[in-house]
Image (cartoon, rainbow, N blue to C red):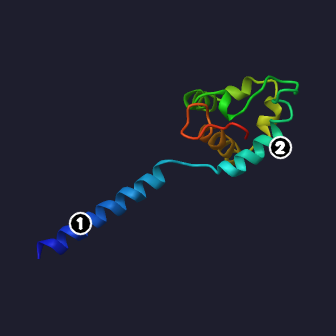
Amino acid sequence: MLKPIFLTGVIAMLLCGFAALSMAEEKGNPRKGKYLFRSNCRTCHQDSGTAPYLGPDSKTVSQWQKAFEKKQYSEFKCKAEWEKRSAEELLDIFTYLHKYAADSPSPAKCQ
């Protein structure tokens, strides 16, 4: 009698935990972020571009977090380009940069 009640309780707790985790962290789409980064940023931020090289692996996870939390991109020369992006697009770009940062589990090498 106690086993079914215990099992039901454990399953309910697990379901609540997974639901809370999925709602707690807002995530963007790294594939869309990669596309947006390449189509909007990479033309200037590459080795032969007009701006310094910038790629996911040029900063650490915490450096990318600070840049987006404090909206440091509003101080960049390309501020007008950033202002054209929606909140969803900025989240996608952040997700891409964060996922492949220099100290991430899968840093970008030839992204």
Q: Is residue 78 above or below residue 34?
A: above
Occupied quadrant, residue 78? top right
Image spot of residue 11 (x, y percent): 29, 66
Of residues 104 and 73, the one nearer the viewer is: 104
- Residue receiving disc 1: 9
Three-letter amino acid code of the residue under disc 2: Ser
- Residue furthest out toward the front: 109
Three-letter amino acid code of the residue under disc 1: Gly
For the N terminus, the image quarter is: bottom left
At 69% from the left and 36% from the top, the residue drawn is: 109
Q: Nearer the viewer, mark 2 or mark 1?
A: 2
| Residue neighbourhood size for the residue with mark 1, other residues' Cα within 10 Å, grouped as few (<14), some (14–19), many (≥20) | few
Occupied quadrant, residue 77? top right
For the C terminus, the image quarter is: top right
Occupied quadrant, residue 44? top right
Q: How many marks?
A: 2
- Residue receiving disc 2: 39
> Mark 2 or mark 1: which comes first in sequence?
1
At 25% from the left and 63% from the top, the residue drawn is: 10
- Residue furthest out toward the bottom: 1
Image spot of residue 59 (x, y percent): 63, 27
At 79% from the left and 22% from the top, the residue drawn is: 52
Image spot of residue 50 (x, y percent): 88, 24
Q: Is residue 15 above or below residue 55?
A: below
Q: Name the element at disc 1.
A: helix
Image spot of residue 15 (x, y percent): 36, 63
Q: Is residue 103 left or right of residue 72?
A: left
Q: Name the element at disc 2.
A: helix
